[in-house]
Image (tube, rainbow, N blue to C red):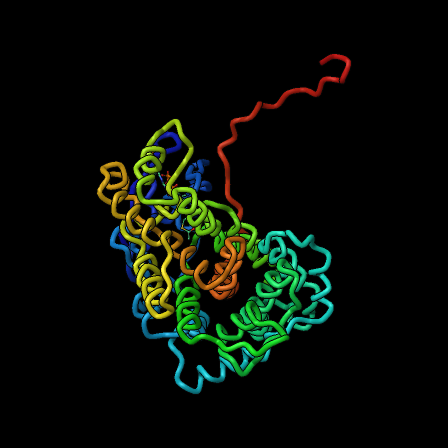
Amino acid sequence: MGESAKLVAGGNKELDLPILTGTVGPDVIDIRKLYAQTGMFTFDPGFTSTAACESALTYIDGDEGVLLHRGYPIGQLAEHSSFMEVSYLLLNNELPSKTELSDFSRTISRHTMLHEQLMSFYGGFRRDAHPMAIMCGVVGALSAFYHDSSDIADPQHRKISSHRLIAKMPTIAAAAYKYSVGQPFVYPDNSLSYTGNFLRMTFGVPAEPYEVNPIVERAMDRIFILHADHEQNASTSTVRLAGSSGANPFACIAAGIACLWGPAHGGANEAALNMLKEIGTPDKIPHYIARAKDKNDPFRLMGFGHRVYKNYDPRATVMQKTVREVFDSLKVSDPLFETALRLEELALSDPYFIEKKLFPNVDFYSGIILSAIGFPTTMFTALFALARTVGWVAQWNEMISDPNQKIGRPRQLYTGPTERDYLPLGKR
Ligand code: ACO
């Protein structure tokens, strides 16, 4: 037997709990037999110390600001790779060869269209519906269209569903945008790249040809890479939990989208941009920093802090650089970027943020660049969902293929009333 941890609990019972070691990162104490042996559970709301699964996809060292996909640093992937290549990597463990990449890209592009019947779902939404509300509904509705690949125990079925989800997400997100601005849906053009196609479906109109700007295409592709996967975050854990019951992948991804929508998670880039707009000019920054530090004020610096990163989020580094590149090449500027840079500088020299290890996260700069590309703030989280879909399906596949997979069923510390007798209405 390897190393173990000793625990004395449940009437002085001494337990040897096995310690499991991964390839890198903290060891974990295996408590699977704890309840059977002591009659006790562990208590860890928010899962701050609990590993809920084994995974070989993504590794994060939050203290060092490291993010690896299948071992490759995010900075290198963002610099040299493409979203299609990273998607292949996440799904298949290894980087693709040239032929594997072109086959994979072709397969994905062949699945970009939506069933015409699905398009009629859009008309049921109000024009001012949030794109995330539409995404939850339409992605969930995909479940009703693909009965041919619904056997989740069949790896081939899972593969087809995964390809469909990755391929259709840009079409679904672009259509949500088109619906909100009252323009006709633009159908996919499979001669374009994954990202170029998405830009055309979003910003193109049937009345005139649409030229994909290669600088914007590259920046957008990089944003997709930066959001592709992020280990066991809230939405990914939601997908895993939903999938653990054997639910179909479209329903599971719809659940992930719902979780991502929250302002503490995917909604933060929208919130960060709104905050920067509210701050407006650099002279107002000290006032907002003071508010963020005030215990009696619920205001937080949006785009700052992270559950895992207690150092600079490596994705924020790439994002900041990308904003600069896009602004330089498009010869545009945005005073909000200057405000953001100054806010970062002031916050990072403030003892409150230093002591609590609060650094900019990926969302701090992403809103600025998405806004420069032309997306309204309401689309930001939808773009995040589009990119994260590959991570969700890769994690879902990994979970289903795990022979130890069980339905996810957390326990609780019950604090409600003990058993009592029902009193008829007249006696209460
Ligand atoms: N501004 C001011 N203070 C903050 C901030 C912030 N953005 N974030 C955390 N703090 C403070 C908290 O008040 C708390 O202080 P205390 O110890 O005195 O009570 C301390 O730092 C720790 O914060 P927690 O909320 O306990 O940390 P947790 O790990 O649970 O939260 C979270 C992480 C939710 C991301 C938080 O930092 C936050 O709300 N940030 C703003 C929202 C945001 O940017 N979310 C995006 C996350 S990244 C993503 O989803 C892709």
The answer to whether one can see residue 406 in this image is no
Residue 264: horizontal and vertical position, in percent? 45, 45
Say which residue appears at 42% left-offset and 37% top-offset. 43
Residue 244: horizontal and vertical position, in percent? 55, 56
Say which residue appears at 37% left-offset and 63% top-offset. 332
Q: Is residue 336 left or right of residue 178?
A: left
The answer to whether one can see residue 300 in this image is yes
Location of the C terminus (image quadrant) = top right
Between 344 and 230, the residue placed more toward the observer is 344
Between 292 and 75, the residue placed more toward the observer is 292
Q: Is residue 329 above or below residue 28?
A: below
Q: Is residue 94 left or right of residue 171?
A: left
Q: Is residue 177 left or right of residue 326?
A: right
Residue, far right: 426
Q: Is residue 413 above or below residue 87?
A: above
Residue 268: horizontal and vertical position, in percent? 45, 48
Ligand 1 is in which quadrant of the figure?
A: top left
